[in-house]
Image: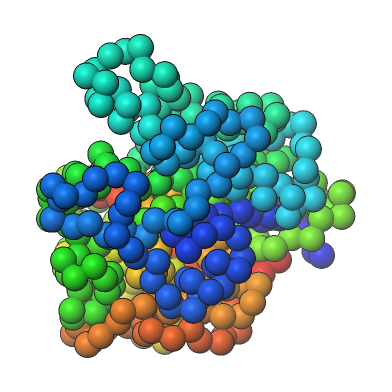
Amino acid sequence: MSTAPDDVLVTGYGLLTGHGAGDAALRDGVFAGNAAFRPVDRFATGRFRSRTAATARELPSAPGTRENPGPPDQRAALVACARAALGMAGLEEPRHADVLLGTQGDHTGVTAFWSGGGSAAVPGIAESLPAALTGLVADDLGVSGRRLAFVNACVASTNALVHGARLIRAGRAGIVLCGGAYLVEPEFFAKFDSGRAFAADGRVRPFSAERQGLLLGDGAAVLVLESGSGARARGAQPLARLSGWGMAADAHHVCHPHPEGTGMARAISAALRDAGAAPEGVDYVNAHGTGTKINDPAETSALHRALGPAARHIPVSSTKSTTGHMLEGSGAVEAVIGVYALLHGILPPTAGYGSPDPVCDLDWVPNEPRSAAVRRVLSVNAAFGGLNAAIVLERP
């Protein structure tokens, strides 16, 4: 293994989606193109227009966390994912590591607060705060180091990865646990439902002419990032190199992306420049791909703008077609998907793809997985407020 001391390596990961936890669920769900959408049964949906999401049948529990009172528990999910990642990395009991998480907090306490008439005495309300949740996860893992929460919506866990990578490249950290989570709960479900953002037919069809909107999904993931020098010293086997990243904001609209994808294009170009990679060197793009009428054409435009003529020859897919939109957890889960594609030489499909849309004119890997020689993956995410983030993952 030839790496520079400031190389940023991925040495382990753990994840949960609506398909379940671990590689088998990832292979048989996301990479097989099987959607995880089902009727929501963890809270009452009778008042909503939509009643569908990609919810996991079983949520993980982890020693050292509080009992799950009923609603989904981000703390348990993140701890379980982190322990899986540390085990994969051969770091079962690290004494010092930074913990950087993208999360809006664990809404179990918030839900109980309002259900109880707004009483501040509701147990768990403090754990609903993003910073508190990050600290509790670090405590459960028994690690010391920085504890940072990123709350900038659907780019939150991508930004956690970017910041963790910066710390390592600058020599300020050796091991960083980066990730994020969102588990489907009634507050954000109600907000998206009232905004008529959900697909009425219960299917997410990104970039397809038939697309009707998004659906939410459970998502939690943690990746172990290490310096190249540290990984070499302990004989670790790297899974991927996080070689480049970029962030940009277009501030075009509170919800809508810039129609020409200018902010996302800048983030992609910055990530490729940081990685020292040309557009022609990208073998696969994991798109943000929400399946909405407004976002998908803007993202297509961004890919054309950033990748130029190469865009027409690069496979692109949206795995939200099977996982749903995992909000703050999206970037971390989709980074794991990118690592899996590098390791196994397979591209996940855009499930539910129907008729081509003339304004979404790229290779969307429709409906079926595809074998490919994958050496470099670009993963992109966007968020309300014109936020955009991109990372580049490569074979180590």
The N terminus, quarter of image? bottom right
User: Residue at point 71% right, 47% down?
Assistant: 86
Which quadrant holds the C terminus? bottom right
Q: Is residue 142 left or right of residue 38?
A: right
Is 109 or 369 nearer to us in this picture? 109
Q: Relative to the observer, which residue lies in front, 115 or 169?
A: 115
Residue 334 appearing in the image = no
Residue 70: x and y in percent read 41, 37
Residue drawn at (43%, 78%), measured in percent from left and top?
A: 33
Picture layout, residue 358 above or below residue 241: below
Q: Would you say 360 lies left or right of 269 here?
A: left
Q: Is residue 18 above or below residue 129?
A: below
Residue 143: give x, y in percent of width and height.
70, 30
Depth order, front residue of 392/219: 219
Q: Which image quadrant is residue 93 in?
A: top right
Q: Is residue 113 above or below residue 154?
A: above
Q: Where residue 157 sits in the image (x, y, percent)?
A: 46, 46
Is 29 left, or right, of 169 in this rendering? left
| Picture mark count | 0
- Residue 136's spot in the image, x, y percent? 56, 27
Among the 4 quarters of the image, the one containing residue 128: top left
* Residue at (18, 80) in percent of width and height: 209
Q: What colour scheme does the image use?
A: rainbow
Q: Up-down: is 121 above or below 303?
A: above
Q: Residue at x 36, y 33 (%)?
A: 107
Instruction: Let me know if residue 236 appears in the view.
Output: yes
